[in-house]
Amino acid sequence: MSNMLRGTMLLSGASFLSRFLGMIFVIPFFAIVGTTGNALFVYAYTPYSIFISLSTVGIPAAVSKFVSKYNALGDYQIGMRMFRAGSALMLATGTVAFLVMFLSADLIGSQQIQGESGSITSDDIAFVIRMVSFALIIIPAMSIVRGFFQGNQSMGPTAVSQTIEQIVRIIAILAGSYIIVSYFDGSITLAVGFAAFAALIGALASCVVLFWYWRKRKPFIDQKIAMQQSTHDFRTIDLFKELFRYAGPFVIVGLAIPLYQFVDQFTFQPAMVASGREAFWETEIAVINNLGHKIIIIPMTIATGLSMAMIPSLTNAFTQNDQTTYTKLINQALQVILVFVIPASAGIAILSDEIFGSLFTLEDIEITGTLMALYAPVALLFGLITVTAGMLQGLDQQNYAVISLLAGLLVKILFNSQFIHMFGGKGAILGTALAAGIAVLLNLIRIRKSADFSYKQTVKRTTLILIFTGMMCFVIAVLKFGFSFFLPYQEERWATIIMLIIGVSAGGLFYLFLAYKSTLLNHVFQGNIPGLNRLKHK
């Protein structure tokens, strides 16, 4: 349990920092390229995310599960064989994905935009897609190294390399786009194209970090291999058969959010134009798929880190038929997500105007703030998709994760255009929430059946979390009402920033106080939160 928590905190911390930096960089990037540039960035980056998932075919995460499984059986050599074979495969698939994405850029761009009269054209989208496609050459092979380390219960290389990759990428994006626009009087399209190309620059920096870790830790791996008594005599083709059996569901899990966004990109502009809302479509798609999205997914970074750290431990317990351990793992994983993501999502929703106004602009805040408030609760569903799919993979029910996510995606495809026609940008959010909710519900049902698991304890603690969250929201609402008499936070940006700081600080501290005093945090983390016991004894 402690290993999973340490791994969870390390990966969650790195993922949170990466997401936080990703949100912060959008502020100066928005100032450089505006709403149009951010919308263009999304139109190219979402297809890239899908190609990344397809080119890796879920193998890095599957390698983590494979290595963890055979390490538990005392066979370290088979994991090394899989690492070498998988690396070669990832280099090949990454190159193929690059060629396909680069050559199909015109087709992808032309299918997302109808007409050439707007500020974003299909040619603009095609150019940025080509620029970002170069990163596909190295990222799949790089990511398999992370999967190998995770399978060996070593989360540090992933955490550090992920953070360095994001920092270098952001520096390249901001410096490059600013120089292009301000010094060379370049177009917004060119600036966004370079920003997309920065994905390759960040990936190269990550490779350097992983190579350093590999040289440092390989002697210990070699020592374990030398000490083992026997190994499984598998042919390479047999290794790949088992690996792809694990890998398929990881593809769908990685694709879930990008696919929801991709459906929006193919349906949003045509539906908005057809329903007479063409004046707002760029602003709304920028909020839903980029500006607001980067903010609301910050809480789900805990889910991402937890899922990645949980799979090896859960697989190990399930392989050894240790029902007590894997039941505790499931319970704790769900409760860690709920105790953080529920109040964070609620806080974003009630402070949506202040968040968007502080970080970006107060212009059109009645549209942008409302969209982000409605979108915020979807972060909980995104987090639960990641974690429950990870649980199913650890329980050897990975095929069902595919079924549930495809069921949700089908709902999104069938109803998205109709919802947008009826409700505008709010309809796209409704379509995503419905799709993600269906996937989560199906996953939870399957977990209960597969692990003979009871949600009784989780439901009880969720009820307490909801009560504390409601109290937190009440405190924030009272503060907003009180400060509205002498703080013009709905009109002046400086006042908006002050109100945001007050709301986040007061609301967050109040919730943590309630959760700590009620012993909720202690029960959820089983007393393993660093500093919690010391605080309790004071």
Image (cartoon, rainbow, N blue to C red):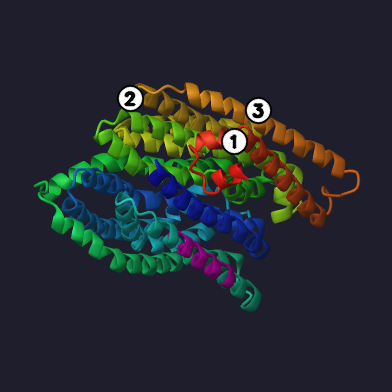
The alpha-carbon separation of the residues under discs 3 and 2 comes to 31 Å
Q: Is mark 2 on a helix, strand or loop?
A: helix
Q: Name the residue under label 2.
A: 450
Answer few, some or many: residues within 10 Å of disc 3's Cα (few below 14, many 20 plus, some between 14 and 19): some
Q: Mark 1 points at which residue?
A: 342
Return the residue nearer the eye: 96 or 233.
233
Q: Give the range drawn in magenta.
A: 162-175
Q: What element carries label 1?
A: helix
Q: Is residue 411 left or right of residue 518?
A: left
* Residue type at tag 2: Ser
- Count of numbered circles in the view: 3
* Residue type at tag 3: Ile
The alpha-carbon separation of the residues under discs 1 and 2 comes to 26 Å
Quadrant of the rendering where the N terminus is positioned: top left
The relative height of residue 262 versus residue 168 in the rendered view (above or below) is: above
Q: Is residue 172 magenta?
A: yes
Whether residue 276 is visible, yes or no, is: no
Q: In which quarter of the image is residue 250?
A: top left
Q: Does the magenta stretch include residue 113?
A: no
Tell me residue 129's x, y (percent).
Answer: 46, 59
Q: Quadrant of residue 442?
A: top left
Tell me residue 13's x, y (percent).
Answer: 50, 53
Residue pushed farthest bottom? 183
Q: Mark 3 points at which residue?
A: 467
The relative height of residue 172 versus residue 158 in the rendered view (above or below) is: below
